[in-house]
Amino acid sequence: MALAPNSSMPDEVRCSFTLREGAYKLATRHEFSKPMRNIPAYSQTTTGYQPTNQVAAVNPHVRVSSVIIPSSNSVTLLCYNFGKEIHVCSQSSLKQSSDGSRILDKRFYKGTSPTCHDFNSTGACMDGVLLAIGFSAGQIQLIDPIRKDYTKLYNEDRLIEKTRVTCIKWVPESSNQFLVSYESGKMYIYNEELTCVNGGAPSFQTFKSGEGYSVYTCKTKSTRNPLYKWDLGESCINEFEFSPCAQYLAVVTRDGLLRVFNYNEMEVIGIGKSYFGSLLCLAWSPDSKFVAVGGEDDLITIWSMSERKIVARGQGHKSWVAALAFDPYITAFDSEYPIGSDSVDDNVDSKLKTETNGKFGTWYRLGSVGQDAQICMWDLMEDTLKHPISKRVSVLVTQSANSTVSSTSGSSNSKYSFSRVTNLFFKETTPSDTSDLTLSQRLSYLTLSDRKKEDKYKKGPALQRDRNTSARSVNFEDLIAIGSVHCPRLNERPLLEPLICKKVALERLTSIQFLEDCFILSCQDGILYVWQRPRRLVNGATEIREGTMV
């Protein structure tokens, strides 16, 4: 159930919070090596705090990637970047060392900064694991932090691409191919076993094209890198991710578009649009049925594979959403009741059990972090996401623990309608005072005004045509305009609230990673926060383990 923030301590940094499954805790007594910790990230000026020149030039977003090395005692390796440095360590070393002596590999780069990285989990073993690293000047490097004598460079002379690498991922179920995206709106597929084209910039020929994208192959007598070039336009590709089933590829770009491709067929199978602004991050659900995206509209948007459209939005952050991740260790498939059924609100829980006959179907846990330095946790239920609301909804009001439910959910004369996703009630009145609301909340009320005012949100004549008009006769800009099926208004989809929304850092958060016994957050000043899971979720542990801030 969503908890109301403590108005007396709005800026307090929290070290613990409680969800249905128990208490999550953070310990701050263990310190790890902090790269460039002697350089202040911000300096105070007459206009406020501004980034220092040293950090602003070499400080891309701090990212964290992980891989599980299979062995008799499985080892989890972590990689994180800060400034011009790359650090690789084991998860256990975060608790055993305070001076950085247990770092597995540490590298410092001159002239360029690492921006993203990814382990190759397919071929990972105790003898070695490949780590792909993208850089701000466009180069790509492969290293092995275990063997340390292995290294390969791609696009070293910047003949293939000169812009910043924004995301890099190994192709699922492949031991030698990886995909790289750039700020220019291009993506390239590389084979680790092949060399790049020699003697100048490569030339490409068209392989496949569609609405808003094209795929090219490299014209060479023998197979060389890059194998394929994807052109998605001029908008920066902020992030992409392969689905867990390895069949689909989701991409978000600066123009606010979500594109979902059938990766093997290289075809677009669905699109979505942010409410406004850029989309910055995305995450696939563990069963590949949903894609969650976040960005500059401060919202969490849920896109459905089966319906090929946006089915819900979540509102909780007060600034841009920087990273998302589904928790595969909490997600339950065809469960009778979510973990921790003994929640604080017995009235709401009993109503949930009655309405669903004790069956909840698939239940997802989603985590998000943002530039407001807050973490939000969301519970999503597949049954609710499959039935988007069609009636007017504008304000979300939490139901107190000692109140009772007096009306039947969904009845026509009911003042409140019940949402099983977050134990909330939708109130159908708009507040007169919106001074305390975020920008996205204020915009939501604008779109919920009378139907007479809706015409000004429509872009182009296509939205006024008959619904049976074929897609080919409709302009692409009209397909993604506010009010279209790919960008519905806030009142046309369920508007969800998080279970919790807590400030957990002093600097903006940049990534979130869920592991079996903890989850890890990173913030822009180079600190990693390890939050330990509740006792009953950590393999039958006898005591609650403490988290670590590194």
Image: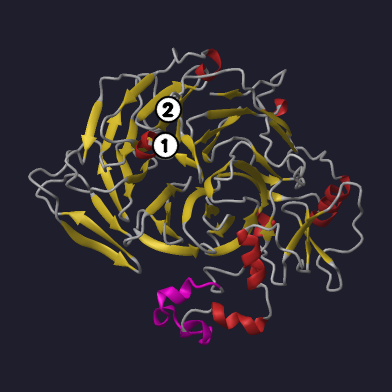
Mark 1 neighbour class, 10 Å CA radius: few under 14, some 14 to 19, many 20 or more = some
Q: Is residue 228 above or below residue 29?
A: below
The residue that mark 1 highlights is 52
As for residue 464 lying within the magenta part, the answer is: yes
Q: Which residues are magenta?
A: 461-482
Q: Is residue 203 above or below residue 53?
A: below
Mark seen at residue 469: none
Q: Nearer the viewer, residue 429 or 220?
A: 429
Looking at the image, do the residues carrying marks 1 and 2 touch, with CB atoms under 8 Å apart?
yes
Q: Helix, strand or loop at disc 2?
A: loop
For marks 1 and 2, give the CA distance: 8 Å
Q: Is residue 425 left or right of residue 508?
A: right
Could you say where residue 395 lies in the image, as x and y percent from the top left? Answer: 74, 63
- Residue 309 visible to the viewer: yes
Disc 1 residue type (three-letter): Thr
Find residue 384 and report its image quarter: bottom right
Q: Helix, strand or loop at disc 1?
A: loop
Q: Residue furthest front?
A: 46
Q: Is residue 460 left or right of residue 430?
A: left
- Residue 145 visible to the viewer: no
Disc 2 residue type (three-letter): Ile
The residue that mark 2 highlights is 39
Residue visible at 37% across and 34% down?
54
Sequence-first disc among 1 and 2: 2
As for residue 29 lying within the magenta part, the answer is: no
Could you say where residue 263 lies in the image, as x and y percent from the top left? Answer: 37, 54
Q: Is residue 392 left or right of residue 518?
A: right
